[in-house]
Image (tube, rainbow, N blue to C red):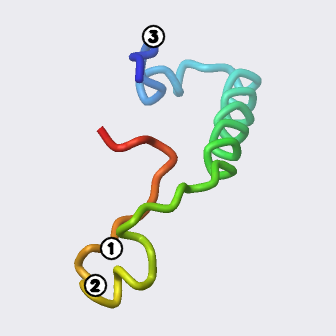
Amino acid sequence: MDIVPGLPLTDTWTRMSEEAKATTQQDLSNYLGELRSISPRATKCSEPHEQQHNPHMIRYPTPFPDT
């Protein structure tokens, strides 16, 4: 993951024009929609039979590989 150059949105929002705010809101909505559309991959610990043996082993799958 890379750091995106620029200023935090919380520091610039009040100085943005209404058009810039609307564009930013639409862009963020589109990005979040793309992230939500990523299918999670199954992990061994997320399989139902594993959960029955040890419910504390539940891992919520993510679209990112384990590191």
**Callout 3, which amino acid?**
Gly
Q: Which is more N-terminal, label 1 or label 3?
A: 3
Q: Which mark is residue 6?
A: 3
The residues tagged by marks 3 and 2 sit, at their Cα atoms, a distance apart of 43 Å
| Location of residue 63 in the rendering, given as x and y in whole percent from the top left corner | 51, 47
Asked where in the image residue 47 lies, by quadrant, the reply is bottom left
Residue 17 x %, y %: 68, 20
Q: Residue at x 74, y 27 (%)?
A: 23
Q: Which mark is residue 58?
A: 1
Q: Residue at x 43, y 30 (%)?
A: 10
Determine whether, in the image, residue 3 is placed left or right of residue 14: left
Write down the residue under mark 2: 55
Check whether the beta carbons of the residues at disc 2 and disc 1 lie within 8 A of each other: yes
Q: Classify 15 as above or below 44.
A: above
- Mark 3 vs mark 2: give the one in front: 2
Name which of mark 3 and mark 2 comes first in the sequence: 3
Residue depicted at 45% across the width and 15% down the height: 4
Relative to 33, does residue 13 appear above or below in the rendering? above
Figure quadrant of the C terminus: top left
Which amino acid type is shown beneath numbered disc 2?
A: Pro
Q: Nearer the viewer, residue 49 or 5?
A: 49
Distance CA(mark 2)–CA(mark 1): 6 Å
The image quarter in which residue 55 lies:
bottom left
Residue 31 placement, left or right of 55: right
Indicate which disc residue 18 carries: none
Q: Amino acid at mark 1?
A: Ile
Mark 1: which secondary structure? loop
Q: Secondary structure at mark 3?
A: loop
Instruction: Say above or below: 3 vs 45.
Output: above
Q: Is residue 13 left or right of residue 44?
A: right
Quadrant (top left, top right, bottom left, bottom right) of the N terminus:
top left
